[in-house]
Image (cartoon, helix red, strand yellow):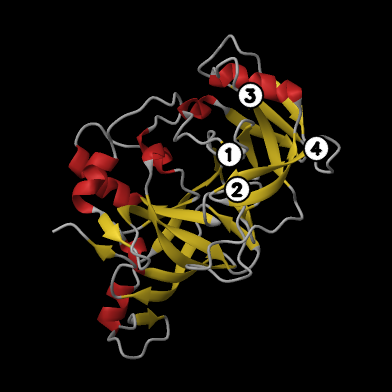
């Protein structure tokens, strides 16, 4: 059955119905993650490029024995690492919970003057540039890897275009070193609804590693299909099935049972592909370049009458 969509020019809706269908939404938070699975950076504005927020997850920590990107799923201590961009080619690495570890300034290599390598991420093989032994040693110390385990900081080659899964995207859509899609959108209202279930042990928004937080009704994002923020158009392409990273404290890496325990009671869903899991947030694909800011009003261009997944909770 074809999905029923409402648009801003929908003439079939009465004025009162149109107002209910299109509540006021605005951007309340913007976040970027310079290094995949490390701490995020709070932004006041963000430049949107085809891969998502410029600079978001263009770096990752690579496990040398497998060639794979390291994530908090297997290496939760990545949450200890706070990267700060000092300039276009300089990155400051800190481990705030480890006062005995000195800060490290890293001059980034773009031209392959250091070791060229590849990294596997979500079954994709991505060309990257190794950023050298000094930062590798720093990472190993912070992550407390075993003596035989080696890692390196790698940067995605700028000219490489990594395609998204065309199941939910288009042939020319791009993504950086994020798991699947360019951006993730979540809602304050949805988090408030979740925390009503959890009680006093509230889950913070940073557990969901979102890029764009909106102010709006709980789980209204599930019905969005196309939106405009500032001068940027976004396709809402896919519900986000949540993994165990949401269980990790985003400062220490320590594990909890929430929010997945509570979400599983109300937010289990099945995608059009048949994949099942716990849904929180929506993946976005930018349709043009531009700048968005905290406080921007969100224009709803296409709205569905149902969520973009099959709810499984009775």
Q: Earlier in the sequence, mark 3 or mark 1?
A: 1
* Residue annotated with mark 3: 150
Q: Earlier in the sequence, mark 1 or mark 4?
A: 1
Q: Which mark is residue 204?
A: none
Residue 156 pos. (x, y %): 70, 46
- Up the image or down, 287 lies above or below 98; here it is below
Q: In the image shown, does 247 or 121 lie closer to the viewer?
A: 121
Q: Earlier in the sequence, mark 2 or mark 3?
A: 3
What is the CA distance from the residue labelled 1 to the residue labelled 4? 19 Å
Q: Nearer the viewer, mark 3 or mark 4?
A: 3
Q: Quadrant of residue 250?
A: top left
The answer to whether marks 1 and 2 mark residues whose Cβ atoms lie closer than 8 Å is yes
What is the CA distance from the residue labelled 2 to the residue labelled 3? 20 Å
Callout 4 crowding tier (Cα within 10 Å): few <14, some 14–19, many ≥20 = some
* Residue annotated with mark 4: 109
What is the CA distance from the residue labelled 3 to the residue labelled 1? 12 Å
Q: Which mark is residue 69?
A: 1
The answer to whether marks 3 and 4 mark residues whose Cβ atoms lie closer than 8 Å is no
Q: Nearer the viewer, mark 2 or mark 3?
A: 3
């Amino acid at each position: 059955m074809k999905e029923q969509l409402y648009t801003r020019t929908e003439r079939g809706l009465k004025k009162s119905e149109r107002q209910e269908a299109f509540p006021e939404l605005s951007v309340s938070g913007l976040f970027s993650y310079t290094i995949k699975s490390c701490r995020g950076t709070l932004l006041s504005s963000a430049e949107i490029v085809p891969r998502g927020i410029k600079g978001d997850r263009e770096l990752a920590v690579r496990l040398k024995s497998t060639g794979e990107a390291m994530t908090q799923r297997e290496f939760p201590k990545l949450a200890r690492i706070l990267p700060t961009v000092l300039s276009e080619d300089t990155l400051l690495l800190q481990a705030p919970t480890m006062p005995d570890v000195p800060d490290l300034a890293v001059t980034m290599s773009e031209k392959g003057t250091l070791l060229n390598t590849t990294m596997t991420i979500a079954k994709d093989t991505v060309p990257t540039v190794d950023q050298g032994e000094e930062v590798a040693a720093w990472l190993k110390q912070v992550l407390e890897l075993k003596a035989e385990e080696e890692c390196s900081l790698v940067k995605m080659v700028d000219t490489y275009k990594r395609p998204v899964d065309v199941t939910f995207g288009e042939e020319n859509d791009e993504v950086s070193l994020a798991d699947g899609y360019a951006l993730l959108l979540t809602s304050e209202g949805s988090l408030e609804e979740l925390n009503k279930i959890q009680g006093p042990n509230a889950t913070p928004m940073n557990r969901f590693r979102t890029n764009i937080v909106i102010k709006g009704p709980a789980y209204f994002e599930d019905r969005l299909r196309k939106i405009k923020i500032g001068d940027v158009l976004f396709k809402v392409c896919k519900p986000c099935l949540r993994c165990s990273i949401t269980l990790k404290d985003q400062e220490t890496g320590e594990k909890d049972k929430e929010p997945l325990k509570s979400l599983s009671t109300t937010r289990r869903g099945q995608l059009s592909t048949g994949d099942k899991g716990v849904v929180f947030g929506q993946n976005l694909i930018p349709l043009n370049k531009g700048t968005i800011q905290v406080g921007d009003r969100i224009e709803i261009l296409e709205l569905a009458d149902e969520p973009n997944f099959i709810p499984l909770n009775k």
